[in-house]
Image: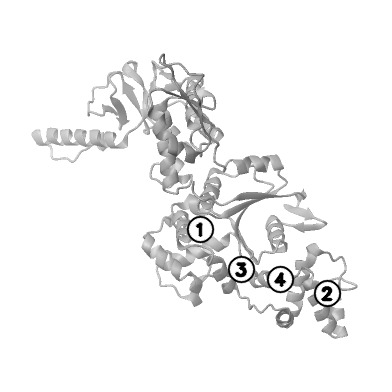
Amino acid sequence: MVCRGNLTFQSFECDYNEVYEAYDVDGDIKNDVQILADYYTYSGYYTFLNSSFWKSLFDCIFWEDITGSEFSKRDFKNIPSQFYEDKIPLSCDIKDITERIDTFSKIITVQSDLNGHALFNMINVKELSLFENFMEVFFDKQNKKVRKSFLHSHGFKYLKANYDERKRYDYFIMFERYFGNKFFKFIDNELEKHGINVEFSAMDVVNSIFSKFSKDQLLSIINRMNLNKESFNSFNPFLAFNGEDILFVFMWDESKKHFDDLEVLWIDFLLNLGFNVEIFAFNKSNNSLSRFVNRFKENKIKLELFNLDENGKENSNSDKLMINDFEHLKNEMNNLNNENILIKLDGEEVIVDEVCDVFSCALEKENNGLSRDYCCRYGDSNPAEFPCKYVEEYFSSIFNVNEGFGQIADSGIWKFNKDKVRDKFKDLSKTMKICPFFDYMSNKKALTKYLKNINPKTMHQWCFVDDEGHSWYFLRKVWFSDEADLDFPGFSKMAGVKKTDKDAKSKAVAILDDTLKKQKNSTGDDTEQTMLDF
């Protein structure tokens, strides 16, 4: 399997104040981003970049495409994405993007408070109590008037009023804002005494972060952001960095019941690139968080192979082979084609051809190191309606009246027999268990949306199929077949419905257009008319 990153979660419990739309943290009202930044700052991360960072990087890489002018650092501003997101995907080949990424360190900008985070955490990396010592020494060096003014401006009677470890960073910011560079120069000198000689700047930190990224990882993220408007807008992770490890953080706040499908795909995409991802949730149960994390774990396989006796029955005396992971399955695939083998998946007999089909689909994803974008064809011109494209293709085939999947009303509306289709999905799911990436519940949810009445006359992604297997399409008041036949036999002759094959439909339209032109030429009519003019 691909070496994936780890997915973890943090659960933050606190009271939600609906009036302020914020959280009450020990008497302080803070919004979700403040709490998030404080948590990772106190946890020793050098910096914590908000989600706008990725939009800024995108701006830099596609500056010329967005503005129409050559990039100039002194002119750089964060362009509001709504001014150009409708242009996405922007035209730029992968080689060009790669060259632009090489120059990102010259043009990227980050939050102004990044320097403070970095310096604060470098102090705490050395020794957690170090800052308290620095703070007291620095404060004692100030004259009495300055000390009194500082305490008065912050409502303190003495320096460590209401102080505890959790407020360490708050005090750091107080000193930074009140004393400015004077405080930072003192800190620099003290750090040198303790063997820490590091000059921080926003760019230094960004370069440190991106030294941990491979060019392929950066390219993959930028390229996926540029797929479409939805992909661009749904990528909103925070980025935490502690000098060694990078962590993508997705926030699950009070108002959000669940992550939407696009966010789920982004999380899986990052895990597949090898990044570690963490979910920071507000007032969510550990059970809910565990269930969500488990969605990204590969399914366990429990496949058993039994030898058959001369009568084709299961030989209870023979040894059975247990396959319990996908790697083992790859090594044993040749055995599945043995006519004397019975295959059971989770204790239920399955058909060898179906197992091989599902295996081939999963193997292609694994061999190419692909995320679940592959599974649902995300970013393709024809994305799947199911999280699993194998299930989509399965249910795009003919729904036949004779097999009980539904019926065609006199009005030409196909009505599903939902129970029959759901039973078929359950049978398919038994075989799908061989795929390490199959998500039963999300595909079941997609099937519910799928089972709506179908009218091929108005829903052009569907067509009728007659008793002889020919497809019938409707376009501009005309029914025509995949053989360009205009003699529609009526709804009673239709056997079922299926997803429209766009290529077959286009060929039929082309034949009809050509026939129509020949008819016009034979009558001397020089008006241009095509199938679309009907």
Above/below status of 437 relative to 268: above
Give left or right: position of 374 versus 32.
Answer: left
Nearer the observer: mark 2 or 1; the answer is 2
Give left or right: position of 509 versus 148.
Answer: left
CB atoms at circles 4 and 1 under 8 Å apart?
A: no
Report the front residue among 348 and 438.
348
Task: Provide residue 257's location: percent of width, then percent of height.
Answer: 65, 42
**Considering the image in quadrants, where does the C terminus appear?**
top left
Nearer the observer: mark 3 or 4; the answer is 4
Can residue 252 be seen from the camera position used here? no
Circle nearer the N terminus (2, 1): 1
Q: Amino acid at mark 2?
A: Ser
Give left or right: position of 206 versus 458.
Answer: right
Circle nearer the N terminus (4, 1): 1
Circle nearer the N terminus (3, 4): 3
**Residue placed under numbered mark 2 in the picture:** 153
Q: Secondary structure at mark 1?
A: helix
**Residue placed under numbered mark 3 in the picture:** 111
Q: Which numbered marker is on residue 82?
A: 1
